[in-house]
Structures are given as C-alpha cells and as structure tokens.
Amino acid sequence: MSKRDFYEVLGVSRDASERDIKKAYKRLAMKYHPDKNPGDESATDKFKEVKLAYEILTDAQKRAAYDQYGHAAFEQGGMGGGGGFGGGNADFSDIFGDVFGDIFGGGGRRGGQARAQRGADLRYNMELTLEEAVRGVNKEIDVPTYVSCDPCSGSGAKPGTSPQTCGTCHGQGQVQMRQGFFAVQQACPTCHGRGKIIKDPCDSCHGQGRVQKTKTLSVKIPAGVDTGDRIRLTGEGEAGEYGAPAGDLYVQVHVRDHHIFTRDGNNLYCEVPVSFTMAALGGEVEVPTLDGRVSLKVPTETQTGRMFRMRGKGVQSVRGGGLGDLICKLVVETPVNLSSKQKELLREFEESLGGSAAKKHKPKSEGFFDGVKKFFDDLTS
Ligand SMILES: [Zn+2]
Ligand SMILES: [Zn+2]
C-alpha cells in the first residue's frame, strides 16, 4: 500500500472540509475507476489509493488518528481495525451505493445490469470493562438481522426454479421513456428496477431472498480499544434482498467507568489515599495497577495532590504508539472517628507546631494567607 500523504492523494489542504474531500474524491474516482480504465493496473492502484484516502479522511475518528500519527495509525493492529480497511481490501462494491450512486444515477446501476440493493449496515453497541478494553477480548454477540435464505440460496425463487429476466427491461432494471425531445431513464415498472421477475416465490422467504434471524457472532476485540472506537465486520450486516451483497456490522465500543482507574489516551489515573503521618514521615504504599499491586515510595513531606508517574503501567493503545503510564495522585486522608485521647494528642501536636516557628512547618499556609490578606486589601482600597 502506498505511503503517499492522504491529503496529497486527494489534492486537498489539511483543513479541507468533508465536502471538499468528497468533491475531490468524486473527481479522482471517476478518472481512475476500473470501469473507465479497463486493463490499466496503475489506474486501479490509483483508484484504491484515492478510495482509501477518502475513507480515512471522511471518518472523523480515522482522520484525527491520521493527523496525529500519519500512516502509522493504520499499520498492523492499528485503529480498532477488525479488517475494516487498509492493505488488500480491494472491494469496490461498498462505495457504489454511496458516492457512485449519485454519480452514475439509478441506485448504483453499473454495466447495464440492474443491481438489487445492498443490505443495510448494522450497529452494535458493546459495553466493555476497562480490563477487557485494555487486554482485548472475544465476545459472543446476538444480532437480530436478515440472513440469506437457505432453501433458495438468496434468489427468492422456489428451489428448483430461478428468477426470470424481466421482459420489459431485458434485465436492465431501467426503461427509457420519451418526454418530448428527451429520453428519460426510469425504474422498470414491471420488475421495480430489479431486472428479474420471480414467478414462483420461495416459501421460506416469500420471494425476498432473505429471512429474519438472530445470529450469534464471535467478535474479537483487539487490545487497547477505547470508547468511541468502531470495529467493522465486513459483510456481517443485513443480507441484501434477492441475493444482493450484505451490509457491514459496526461494533461501537463503550468502556464502562472503572472504580479505581480513569483512562485518558494511553495513560491511567488513580487516586491513592495516604495517612497524614505517612505523608509527613514518608514510607511505602501499595498502589493498584492492571497487572496487580506495586509498591510506591512516598517521600517525606509529601503534600496532598502530588502526582507520581509509574512508567509503562498504563495502556498500549490499539493505534500503536508507546505504552502509557499510570499516574497516581496521592491524597492525604483526614483521620475520622477519633477517640478523645487521639484528639488530645492531635491538639498537643498542633501546639507543638505553634509559636513563632509555626511557619516553617506549614509551607502552603504562609503564601496562602498572605495572598488572602492581599486579596481583601485590594478589595477595600
Ligand atoms: Zn424490468
Ligand atoms: Zn428463499
């Protein structure tokens, strides 16, 4: 697969709008389309390159990943892939219903043959725990959908018979109507644009070529996905009518909140409570990571809110890049449910900090109260 810059491929600027990109794509796709350049390998390659650039730059998420990481975002294991796109995916069919539908007209008509409509794409919302998202997981999902009818192999015609070519349009799906000087293409009224007539419909699907069914799929979620990632399962959407190609299934990932960790990109964050004695004297505290506990050294005189970075204890994103870090925020905990003895000790302790030496034990207070005083002085002056 080529490494040319996607913006360059489409000849648009990096801040091009989706409309500009679509426009550029239409122009180039028309130029290099295999139907227009029969036997020309380089045109086919160009076409694929243009198509890939278009697919990525019109998907907000992929475009953002591309802007940030370049082609690396889509290499091996990249981009919540699931075989969605990238090398080797030379399937032209999926865009005909999309952009080519309105270029060539007639609902994706191509090469003089009527084409039944491709099945609908489906979206499945999948909730994952943070652990599942970070490590990857195989999930079985039940998807209510349409599947190709078995007895008639999707043709819609009773087994043993086959659909007949429509006599009115001779299989074109379109007929020419004259209106004054103009010849206008219209969907064939006999076959409703399908090009075929089913005389003897299949009993199972009543001539639809597909039946409703809940199918169970095993979905491999790659390690490192995050909320908003989408995995495309090509051809696992609804079966089309009359044997038309199936749509795709998009698995939309949503990661549930975790009771300890918050994720931001490749980094994980957590709060670790420490007693104020430990914060003052230093010590060691156990902190959780996704692979078990590790020990964190708390330096003496640690203030609340101080962050500690545990390198490499974060997440490896599905988009590649380095392994993230775990960032622990130490929070000094105020003791509760104190006995009168304990309270007495604290008062005694507080007194021991008092007097003219108080400031040296309270590094934040001094600056803070000076600031407060200045604030009120400024207000009243
Ligand atoms: Zn017809
Ligand atoms: Zn059938």
Image (cartoon, rainbow, N blue to C red):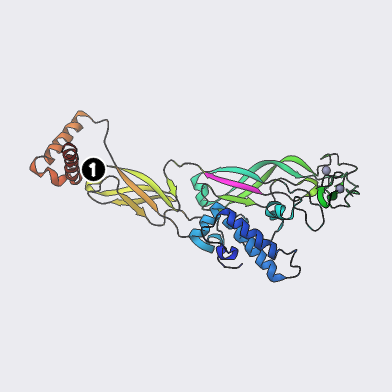
Q: Going by the image, does 111 lie left or right of 13? A: right
Residue drawn at (55%, 58%) of the image: 78
Residue 273, image x, y percentages: 32, 42
Quick check: 330 left or right of 66? left
Q: Residue furthest front?
A: 180
Q: How many marks?
A: 1
Residue furthest to the top in view is 340
Residue 279 lies in quadrant: top left
Q: Residue at x 47, y 41 (%)?
A: 257
SS for callout 1: helix
Q: Position of residue 220 (x, y in %)?
A: 60, 51
Quadrant location of the C terminus? top left
Q: Identify residue for label 1.
A: 277
Residue 88 showing in the rendered view? no
Q: Is residue 27 left or right of residue 379?
A: right
Relative depth, front residue between 183 and 155: 183
- The local crowd at label 1, few if under 14, some if 14 to 19, many if 20 or more residues have their Cα within 10 Å, is few
Residue labelled 1 has its Cβ within 8 Å of some atom of ligand 2: no
Q: Residue 285, relative to residue 320: is it above or below?
A: above
Q: Is residue 212 visible?
A: yes
Q: Is residue 183 magenta?
A: no
Q: Position of residue 262 (x, y in %)?
A: 43, 45
Read off the magenta span.
Answer: 246-254
Q: Residue placed at 86% from the left, 42% from the top? A: 202
Q: Position of residue 204 (x, y in %)?
A: 83, 39
